[in-house]
Structures are given as structure tokens and as C-alpha cells.
Image: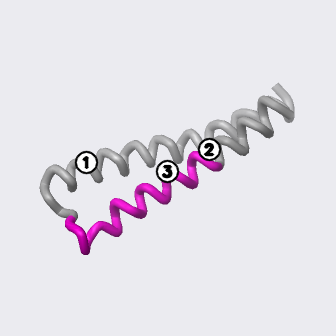
Amino acid sequence: SGIYGATFFMLTGFPGAHVTIGTIILFVMLMRVMRGHFDADHQFAFEAASWYWHFVDVVWIGLFVFVYVL
């Protein structure tokens, strides 16, 4: 309860929603790969999904340090 609890759940819940969105994006990419939508010249959506996951990874590393280590 209080400011710590509110901050903790905001800092972990909001990025958690991004992980859920990223999981949906990965499923969509899997379906598109299985249907042959990508080739050597047309794969931007796949790359964008990869960039998104790198962003989520970096945010989680920062949150881990901020919430659990410090």
C-alpha cells in the first residue's frame, strides 16, 4: 500500500502490458512466416517486431535494476 506499492505495480504492470503486446506480435509474425509473406527484400514487419522486443528487453533490465537492486 502507499506510494511504494503504487509505484511498484505501475513500473511492472505497464511494461508487462508491452510484453503481452509483443507476444501477440510474435504470434502474428509466426503466422505470416508460415504463409510465406517475407522474402529477402520484404521483411520490415519482422525487423520491426525484433526492434520492439529489444526495446522491451532494455526497459526490463532498467526496471530490474531500479526496482530490485537499488
Residue at 25% x, 74% y is 41
Mark 2 lies on a secondary structure that is helix
The amino acid on which the numbered mark 3 sits, given as a three-letter code, is Trp
**Residue 54 image offset from top left, x and y in percent:** 53, 52
Mark 3 lies on a secondary structure that is helix
In the image, 31 versus 11, the foreground residue is 31
Q: Is residue 64 left or right of residue 41?
A: right
Magenta-highlighted residues: 39-58
**Residue 38 image offset from top left, x and y in percent:** 21, 64
In the image, 34 versus 17, the foreground residue is 34
Q: Earlier in the sequence, mark 3 or mark 1?
A: 1
In the image, 52 versus 39, the foreground residue is 39
In the displayed image of the protein, which residue is found farthest to the left?
Answer: 35
Q: Which mark is residue 14?
A: 2
Rendered view: 34 above or below 46: above
Query: Main SS of the magenta segment?
Result: helix
Neighbour class for label 2 at 10 Å: few (<14), some, many (≥20)?
few
- Give the alpha-carbon distance from disc 2 to disc 1, as whole Å: 25 Å
**Residue 27 image offset from top left, x and y in percent:** 30, 45
Mark 1 lies on a secondary structure that is helix
Q: Earlier in the sequence, mark 3 or mark 2?
A: 2
- Give the alpha-carbon distance from disc 3 to disc 2, as whole Å: 15 Å
Q: Which mark is residue 30?
A: 1
Which quadrant would residue 68 be assigned to in this image?
Answer: top right
- In this figure, which residue is indicated by the disc labeled 3? 53
In the displayed image of the protein, which residue is found farthest to the front?
Answer: 40
